[in-house]
Image: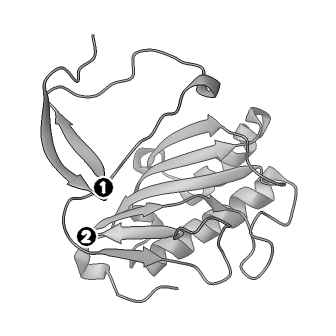
Amino acid sequence: MSNTTNPVRAGSMAGVILVLLREPARKTFRYAMASQIQMQVVGRIGGPRRNLEISGVGHHDPIPLGAMTGELLCSSGIRGGDPGEDAHGTADTAVFQARRGLDNVASLMRAGGGTTDDIGHLTVLVQDHADVADIDAVVESMFPDPADRPARQVLKLGLKNRARVQFHVTAVVPHARQHPSSA
């Protein structure tokens, strides 16, 4: 039985209703992604939103590379494109794109006043599961201490063009370190 039987309405944000559940949410079944849509919403109610960009890094969607509300920093998809070059990745290897993508993640964190130490969750989208071991090695070089790594989720998803890897981050940046400018 779904644990949404006793929801408590917490508020709404930009037309999205946020619901607090009396029990922890958990996915208990598998479904074919081709036949359904899964939407995850993370947010903080209240406070102004500040959009973050990295000069030379972007994508074709009319959305910011990252956004902050209070101390919460969430990113859009961050690829391994070189600032000032092709945003979809200029080299075909997963290792190159992972290194460059994590450099872009670090730049986005700096734009929000944070560091990669503030990342609580890292989602890694891959074009081919065969690349996961190589990408993991690059991720582990950024987070060498196994006891101090962010939670991580790896998903196989059809990425556009020559992209082999894409990162999404969720982080908490203490107010004391935030600054209003972006990189």
- Residue drawn at x 50%, y 50% is 122
- Which image quarter: residue 177? bottom left
Disc 1 target residue: 43
User: For the residue labelled by badge 2, is the local secondary structure a helix, a strand or a loop?
Assistant: loop
User: For the residue labelled by badge 1, is the local secondary structure a helix, a strand or a loop?
Assistant: loop
Residue type beneath disc 1: Gly
Q: Pointers 2 and 1 in contact (CB under 8 A)?
A: no
- Residue drawn at x 53%, y 60% is 76
Residue, far right: 92
Q: Is residue 70 above or below residue 134?
A: below
Closest to the observer, 117 or 8: 8
Mark 2 vs 1, N-terminal side: 1
- Residue at mark 2 to residue at mark 1: CA–CA distance: 10 Å
Q: Is residue 33 above or below residue 158?
A: above
Q: Residues within 10 Å of mark 1 (few under 14, many from 20)?
A: few
Q: In this figure, what is the number of numbered marks?
A: 2
Disc 2 target residue: 70
Q: Quadrant for the N terminus, please.
A: top left
